[in-house]
Image: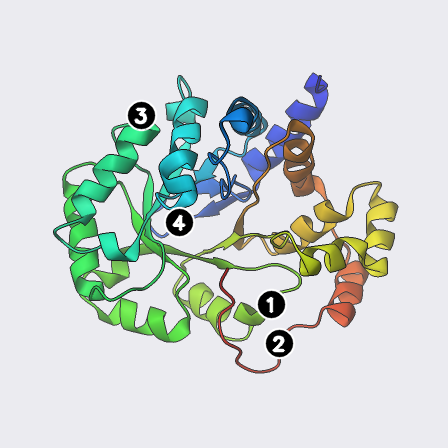
Amino acid sequence: MVESWKIAVIRETLNKRVISLPDGSSVPILGQGTWNMGENSRTKEQEVKALQLGIELGMTLIDTAEMYGNGGAEQVVGEAIKGLRDRVFLVSKVYPHNAGKNKITEACENSLRRLQTDHLDLYLLHWRGQIPLEETFEGMEKLKIEGKILRWGVSNFDTEDMDELVASANGTNCITNQVLYHLGSRGIEFDLLPWQKQHQMPIMAYSPIAQGGSLRRQLLRDSTILDIAHSHNVQPLQIVLAWCIRSNQVIAIPKAGQPEHVMQNAAAACIELTTEELARLDEVFPAPTRKVPLDII
């Protein structure tokens, strides 16, 4: 059982650490991802409870997609937010091949049905496909008029894509760009992150602790990260996540399917890395000095 005072401290911290969106609304700096959820019926109940704990802790932004588990993740989220919908900033994503004017409405309605809600707070184009951007944006604006979504944005767009986006009809109504960003993948710091800051459009970072695999193991076993984690009496993954949100300009959406991991993610918002610690991490995981292709998982 989680101590009530810990929940109170974490919730208070997350209530203070919010990021403003271009339309004047705000979201917590830490949300919850759902990639790989909804793929196994045996873990559904645990996933639902994990999301509900995250909401209780203040990670009220939940990100999902029609692609995740072929809609299974949206169904998990729908179960998790029953009775809590007014506390949640709900995000989902549309496949590129469903982003045309003849398909986007149906795709959105299918997501809403699985999520058991009548609207999305934010709807993202999952990645760029063959549908012209202006056609997708026109569809997004129509969904806004119909009240099915309140805002829209994009995902996995690099700087050139964003330049084209804002030059397109309705493109300046984009709210955010969701991309891969973590300590071991800092490529966006060279040009995309500055571009987003200039246009006052926050980045939403997926896999902020790195996706499972050799890179994640490298991060969580790195001696510098382990040493910093020890000094804060926390887990290495919490240092990696605290680094991602260090500037208060990036929204991170880590995924957690177990209560302990949810608590660790939320508590990372309470970690303040020192200038010296950040410099040590920069030395081991340096910022880019040139343009690199956008990392995508």
State the residue at coordinates (64%, 51%).
212
Q: Residue at 67% across / 32% down in the picture?
A: 263
Residue 288 is labelled as: 2
Mark 3, Cα crowd under 10 Å, few <14 / some 14-19 / many 20+, is some
* 4 or 2: tag closer to the N-terminus: 4
Foreground label between 4 and 1: 1
Picture mark count: 4
Q: Identify residue type, mark 3.
A: Gln
Query: N-terminal of the two: label 2 or label 3?
Result: 3
Residue type at mark 4 is: Leu
Quarter of the image where the N terminus is located: top right
Identify which amino acid the numbered label 2 is placed on: Pro
Residue at the disc numbered 4: 21
**Nearer-N-terminus badge (1/3):** 3
Give whichever of discs 2 and 1 has the lower sequence position.
1
Element type where label 4 sits in the image: loop
For disc 3, the marked residue is 116
Asked if 214 appears above or below 13 in the picture, the reply is below
For the residue pair 50 and 148, the one nearer the viewer reads as 50
Please say if 155 is above or below 24.
below
- Give the residue at mark 1: 186
Q: Is residue 55 visible?
A: no
Tell which tag, 4 or 2, sits nearer the viewer.
2
Q: CA distance from mark 4 to mark 3?
A: 25 Å
